[in-house]
Image: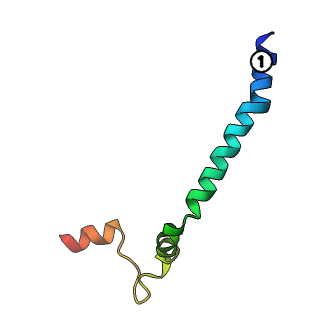
């Protein structure tokens, strides 16, 4: 069996199964029950400083001088 046929067979079977397993693992990890609070916190980042913009690196350096 030549190497092309061997690699093609591997890609058609075992690599596909491995990639589907990785995809399902990422989906399960993203939607796990304990991550709801983390995702809600990340989603609310733009609204943390409603009264004034968040201080950037330049503003923080100026304020510390």
x%, y% of residue 52?
39, 86
The residue drawn where x is 53% and y is 74% is 43
**Quadrant of res 53:** bottom left
x%, y% of residue 4?
79, 16
Q: Quadrant of the N terminus?
A: top right
User: Observer-nearest residue: 9 or 62?
Assistant: 9
The residue drawn where x is 61% and y is 51% is 25
Label total for image: 1
Q: Is residue 46 above or below residue 30?
A: below
x%, y% of residue 27?
63, 57
Among all residues in the image, which is located at the extreme bottom? 51
Among all residues in the image, which is located at the extreme left? 65
Q: Is residue 25 above or below residue 33?
A: above
Q: Is residue 43 above or below residue 16?
A: below
User: Observer-nearest residue: 48 or 3?
Assistant: 3
Q: Is residue 64 above or below residue 52?
A: above
User: Observer-nearest residue: 30 or 42?
Assistant: 30
x%, y% of residue 14?
72, 32
The residue drawn where x is 74% and y is 37% is 16
How crowded pointer 1 is (Cα within 10 Å; few <14, some 14-19, many 20+) is rated as few
Left of 25 or right of it: where is 3?
A: right
Left of 38 or right of it: where is 26?
A: right
Q: Quadrant of the C terminus?
A: bottom left
Q: How is the image coloured?
A: rainbow
Mark 1 falls on what kind of element? helix
Q: Which residue is mark 1?
A: 6
**Quadrant of res 9:** top right
């Amino acid at each position: 069996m030549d190497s092309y046929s061997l690699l093609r067979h591997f890609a058609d079977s075992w690599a596909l199964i491995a990639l589907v397993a990785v995809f399902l693992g990422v989906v399960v990890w993203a939607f796990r029950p304990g991550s709801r609070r983390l995702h809600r916190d990340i989603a609310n980042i733009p609204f943390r400083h409603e009264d004034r913009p968040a201080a950037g690196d330049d503003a923080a350096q100026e304020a510390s001088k």
